[in-house]
Image (tube, helix red, strand yellow):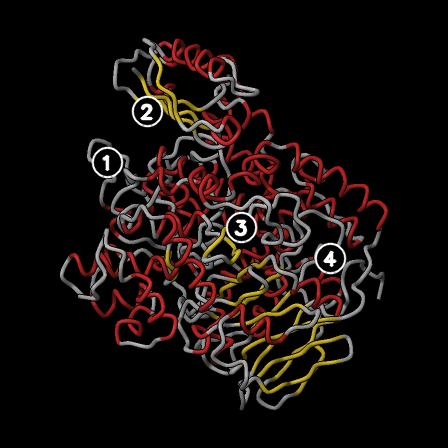
């Protein structure tokens, strides 16, 4: 299983802090998260297409420094999904 | 007088606490057009009056409380006024910006700015109304905490107050207005040194805008743009500044263990999400600034009382900074600091530094990383200077390092404690910390950390382009502050789609080009005639100030005003003894790698500093030359 953690607006809007999914790539993880949220009956849950617009880290590394959505995953990996933020 | 500007009262006064005299201070319409208001108006007053070194506690030190043209006008997030003085921490000019209601009330009382000098013989409350200025005895207010003193003063007026920390000359004491703070630089201690406990302002009616209808119409569009933007319409209202913390962690920018590292393993318990889920009271309003559609402040409950929650800086510094994962304790400490009247950033930096001094055997204060049972005691002791330990902590990081050692890891620049952003993973932010007029302030630095990873993703470890971007950001933020808006309104500068789609080809291309765009943007800034236009989506502030004042402002002229402000502060600081070698950071950040496997994980300060001086048009000694002073019209008197 891969743990997918939600941060920021995504977390507040879905009221979900994390989900665990089976997936061999980041792309498959997006699809599995969509299915998981749908199964949980989350209102306005993001689709896999929406999730691609979140900044995505695999074990702390941005997927654009890896193989993007083709980045391979293994059991125990951790994905973080978040949006750009501001403040100061 | 050629014309009458709108949005200004047209009056500045000088109040001498020593002999209780009040005099008009001449500040012309031309000067208002060139120096706008707020911190730049204050800088001009210092520029024209301060020519040699002066101690912050010298009775001749001036406190300039200055409003901005947009204070009280129909414009979003526009209540922010400014307080400036020579700082007890840095010995240089400091300025602090506050979102309470005082600025609006000062304009209603009939003043654009008030200069306070001298030292009162007795504890004093200064009462400024549209009928005049009164000096009131404040013996009954002395010793009270900041909320108590405001309650006791009562009435419908703007109130600027200090707490025990200001009275006891804690070098980073702040001034509080409602629940907002003019936090940085120790302004509260300057009040305290003058026996000044509070200043109130009230009046019936403020000045009118030059073109009220146009301003109101523009305001509607601007508010809508802020509400539609993903940062100012969603993230900041829902998460506050605490929403930054996770991004800081992921980007290795979360100052951890007194800036030894950029990541903290227990960050999730400190995140904005955790704060929102466990402490934030969404039904509570009134904690944010006046006239603000963003409403970023958090309302939290502590012992049954609704209070203003902590910002990301204290969460970072007293969370990751001291290896503490207990957010509830941070909420309590934040409240105590506000009540005592201490800057939460400096006070937090002092505590983390004391812990490292202890760990290294340099000073046993009893404070230890990861142990939090005695932190509240230490905060109260430092705020009241009630113990030997508290007395040492009240002096700030720089003086502590001079006494106990640890200069290489003392987290300050020019004497002002650094904010919670670890700059080895945002080197442009590191440059900003080092060169900022105020000292180690994330905002006065130019807040490049937004472009280097939090909002955008420009390469955070390349020094390329950072000098020009820092210059441009500083100038824009300086002007926005002077206009009276919150700096968060600048986020509209970034098109919403880049925030909604950070992985898109366009966004990634802009991020890659950002270090190279800096030069182009800087060139445009140097040639304001190239920006003789007003794009409301980019810099609506210039248009709002134009409608409010009647001054023929455009984006180029507006940015030039910011450049004036930055240069005047620099010149005043040089008169106060600033040297190029003071534009620096602790060696930990410039000589130690944050990540042993990445040889670029340090702040290449000297490289960037040279370029920064060049971009600013300063000499190698960091001094603005006469031709720049002339070009910027800094000596304008009438």
Residue B39 lies in quadrant = bottom right
Q: CA distance from mark 2 to mark 1?
A: 14 Å
Q: CA distance from mark 3 to mark 4?
A: 24 Å
Sequence-first tag of 4 and 1: 4
**What label does residue B72 carry, if any?**
4
| Chain under callout 4 | B
Q: Position of residue B465 (x, y in %)?
A: 44, 36
**Secondary structure under the numbered disc 2 in the rendered image:** strand
- Asked if residue B33 lies left or right of residue B270, the reply is right
Within 10 angstroms of label 4, few (less than 14), some, or many (20 or more) residues? many
Q: Which residue is mark 2?
A: A61
Q: CA distance from mark 4 to mark 1?
A: 48 Å
Circles 3 and 4: CB atoms closer than 8 Å: no
- Looking at the image, can residue A37 be seen? yes
**What label does residue B595 carry, if any?**
1
The label nearer to you, 3 versus 4, is: 3
Residue B399 lies in quadrant = bottom left
- Asked if residue B600 lies left or right of residue B209, the reply is left
């Amino acid at each position: 299983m891969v743990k997918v953690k939600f941060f920021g607006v995504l977390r507040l809007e879905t009221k979900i802090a994390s989900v665990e999914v089976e997936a061999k790539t980041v792309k498959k993880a997006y699809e599995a998260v969509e299915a998981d949220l749908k199964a949980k009956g989350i209102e306005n849950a993001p689709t896999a297409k929406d999730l691609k617009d979140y900044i995505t880290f695999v074990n702390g590394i941005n997927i654009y420094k890896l193989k993007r959505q083709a980045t391979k995953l293994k059991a125990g990996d951790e994905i973080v999904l978040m949006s750009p933020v501001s403040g100061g | 007088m050629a014309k009458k500007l709108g949005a200004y009262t047209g009056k500045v006064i000088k109040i001498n606490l020593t002999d209780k005299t009040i005099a008009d201070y001449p500040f012309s319409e031309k000067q208002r057009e060139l120096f706008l208001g707020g911190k730049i108006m204050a800088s001009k007053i210092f520029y024209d009056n301060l020519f040699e070194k002066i101690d912050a506690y010298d009775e001749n030190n001036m406190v300039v409380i200055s409003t901005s043209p947009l204070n009280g006008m129909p414009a979003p997030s526009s209540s922010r006024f400014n307080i400036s003085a020579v700082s007890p921490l840095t010995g240089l000019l400091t300025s602090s910006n506050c979102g309470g209601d005082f600025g609006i009330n000062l304009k209603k009382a009939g003043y654009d700015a008030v200069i306070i000098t001298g030292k009162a013989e007795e504890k004093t409350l200064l009462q400024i109304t549209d009928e005049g200025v009164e000096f009131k005895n404040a013996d009954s207010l002395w010793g009270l905490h900041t909320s108590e003193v405001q309650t006791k003063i009562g009435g419908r007026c703007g109130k600027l107050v200090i707490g025990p920390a200001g009275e006891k000359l804690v070098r980073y004491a702040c001034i509080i207005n409602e629940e907002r703070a003019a936090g940085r630089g120790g302004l509260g201690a300057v009040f305290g040194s003058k026996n000044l406990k509070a200043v109130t302002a009230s009046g019936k009616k403020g000045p009118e805008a030059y073109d009220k209808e146009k301003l109101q119409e523009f305001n509607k569009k601007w508010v809508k743009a802020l509400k539609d933007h993903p940062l100012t319409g969603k993230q900041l209202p829902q998460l506050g500044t605490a929403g930054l913390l996770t991004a800081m962690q992921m980007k290795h920018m979360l100052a951890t263990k007194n800036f030894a590292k950029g990541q903290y393993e227990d960050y999730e318990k400190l995140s904005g999400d955790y704060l929102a889920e466990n402490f934030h009271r969404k039904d509570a309003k009134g904690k944010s600034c006046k006239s603000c559609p963003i409403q970023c402040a958090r309302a939290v409950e502590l012992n049954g009382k609704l209070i203003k929650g902590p910002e990301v800086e204290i969460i970072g510094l007293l969370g990751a900074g001291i290896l503490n994962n207990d957010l509830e304790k941070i909420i309590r400490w934040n409240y105590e600091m506000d009540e005592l009247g201490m800057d939460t950033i400096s006070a937090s930096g002092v505590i983390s530094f004391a812990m490292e001094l202890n760990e290294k055997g340099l000073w046993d204060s009893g404070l230890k990383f990861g142990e939090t049972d005695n932190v509240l005691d230490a905060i109260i002791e430092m705020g009241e200077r009630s113990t030997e330990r508290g007395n040492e902590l009240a002096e700030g990081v720089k003086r502590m390092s001079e006494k106990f050692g640890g200069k290489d890891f003392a987290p300050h620049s020019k004497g002002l404690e650094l904010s919670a952003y670890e700059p080895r993973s945002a080197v442009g932010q590191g440059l900003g910390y080092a060169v900022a007029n105020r000292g180690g302030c994330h905002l006065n630095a130019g807040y490049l950390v937004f472009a280097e990873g939090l909002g955008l993703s420009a390469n955070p470890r390349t020094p390329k382009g950072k000098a020009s971007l820092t210059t441009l950001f500083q100038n824009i933020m300086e002007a926005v502050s002077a206009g009276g808006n919150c700096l968060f309104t600048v986020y509209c500068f970034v098109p919403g789609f880049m925030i909604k789609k950070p992985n898109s080809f366009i966004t990634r291309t802009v991020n890659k080009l950002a270090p190279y765009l800096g030069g182009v943007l800087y060139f445009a800034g140097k040639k304001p005639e190239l920006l003789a236009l007003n794009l409301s989506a980019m810099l609506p502030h210039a248009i709002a100030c134009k409608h409010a004042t009647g001054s023929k402002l455009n984006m180029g002229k507006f940015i030039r005003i910011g450049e004036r402000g930055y240069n005047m502060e620099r010149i005043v600081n040089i008169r106060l003894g600033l040297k190029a070698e003071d534009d620096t950071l602790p060696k930990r950040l410039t000589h130690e790698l944050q990540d042993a496997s990445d040889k670029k994980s340090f702040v290449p300060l000297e490289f960037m500093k040279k370029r920064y001086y060049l971009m600013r048009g300063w000499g190698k000694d960091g001094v603005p030359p006469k031709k720049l002073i002339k070009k910027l019209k800094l000596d304008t008197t009438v």
